[in-house]
Amino acid sequence: MSQDFDEAWGHKAKELYDNIWQNFTDPELRRVISSIRILGPANLGVAKRQQYNSLLSNMSRIYSTAKVCFPNKTATCWSLDPDLTHILASSRSYAMLLFAWEGWHDAVGIPLKPLYQQVTALSNEAYKQDGFSDTGVYWRSWYESATFVEDLERLYHQLEPLYLNLHAYVRRALHRRYGDKFINLRGPIPAHLLGNMWAQSWENIYDMVVPFPDKPNLDVTNAMVQKGWNATHMFRVAEEFFTSLGLLPMPPEFWAESMLEKPDDGREVVCHASAWDFYNRRDFRIKQCTRVTMDQLSTVHHEMGHVQYYLQYKDQPVSLRQGANPGFHEAIGDVLALSVSTPAHLHKIGLLDQVTNDMEPSIRGSALQLSETKPTLMPELNFMYPT
């Protein structure tokens, strides 16, 4: 019913305002009309829309249920979370990492490819009816910059020297571990060796690249485990951090409805952490298969940062209940996550015994760990995906 209502009003807005909305002088009215006249997949006829939704559902099912099984050992199968994620993060066996990486990408990528191609075609067809040449143009329109692609190119070149130095430093460290057989000191880095299924953040191999191995480590995972932290406590600590800044506590619905741990009732779920606004001004949730690690503690704060943003604009008109742009939402989450990783804050929440002058090398190491997380998200061209 809600979808039918939204589509009806969207079609009405398109009919009434398509040729004149850009002439409105009130910027807020122009933004609202611009938003509701974009129907996306609702532009498709009933049959194609059902096909589109079915494809998305099947893609989600494949992604959430894919497993990697040992040959001839069907009882030994690994799901992405927590099994394969843990293997990619902790194993240092080249063969094991390659088996896990290839196995999951084959289990997911091969069946997803034809479905993705169909979804892309249908999505492009839909957004063309909204005046965009394809879905990518629509996505980039969210940033409201006529020079968005050029802006990204400029930012990439600003970061490129840092990235190339980081890439060379990490490659040399991996060469010390795996040798000439697997690491070419003048070539790309094999993606499965970087501690992450998508090679997009490298902090899980920090133990192999740490610049000051004899100095205190700011990774407080062991302290969290020893003190008996669990997922709920991690989220309560995050909430206390936000309220200490004068921001809002999580509403009751958050604690009642969020999925903070992977279900143990046999349900297959996509464990990738995400925050959700249900647009009723009360129901805000996080979906995360939380593990007790420092990295996950940062993720908890990041995701709760999204919810905090939702809470701050919940009383705006629906068309305005979104971030200034997708990057801004992520920036809010990341700034807050970084704030909780400082020695002073870790000491405050009881995870670091003391903060001393000897912390400077550890802080430098932490800066390297951060650089393994953020700059590595931008360039995706220097990874060698094994075949």
Image: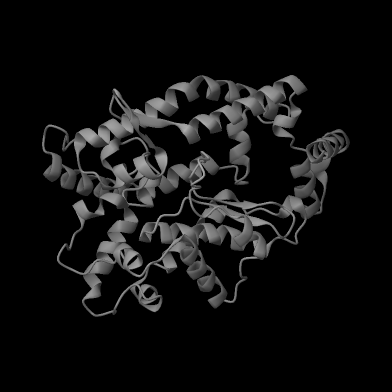
The one of 180 and 291 positioned closer to us in this rendering: 291
The one of 161 and 221 positioned closer to us in this rendering: 221
**Is residue 130 something one can see in this rendering?**
no
Tell me the residue at 38%/57% (across/down). Answer: 295
- Quarter of the figure with residue 126: top right
The one of 40 and 346 positioned closer to us in this rendering: 346
Tell me the residue at 20%/36% (across/down). Answer: 94
Residue 378 x %, y %? 40, 44
Location of the C terminus (image quadrant): top left
Residue 145 x %, y %? 60, 45
Above/below status of 30 relative to 121: below
Q: Is residue 248 left or right of residue 91?
A: right
| Color scheme of the displayed model | one colour
Q: Is residue 206 left or right of residue 320?
A: left
Above/below status of 120 relative to 244: above
**Is residue 210 something one can see in this rendering?**
yes
Residue 360 x %, y %? 24, 72
Number of marks present in the image shown = 0
Tell me the residue at 47%/44% (across/down). Answer: 152
Q: Is residue 246 left or right of residue 215?
A: right
Residue 141 x %, y %? 63, 41
Q: Is residue 84 left or right of residue 184?
A: right
Location of the N terminus (image quadrant): top right
Tell me the residue at 60%/63% (across/down). Answer: 308
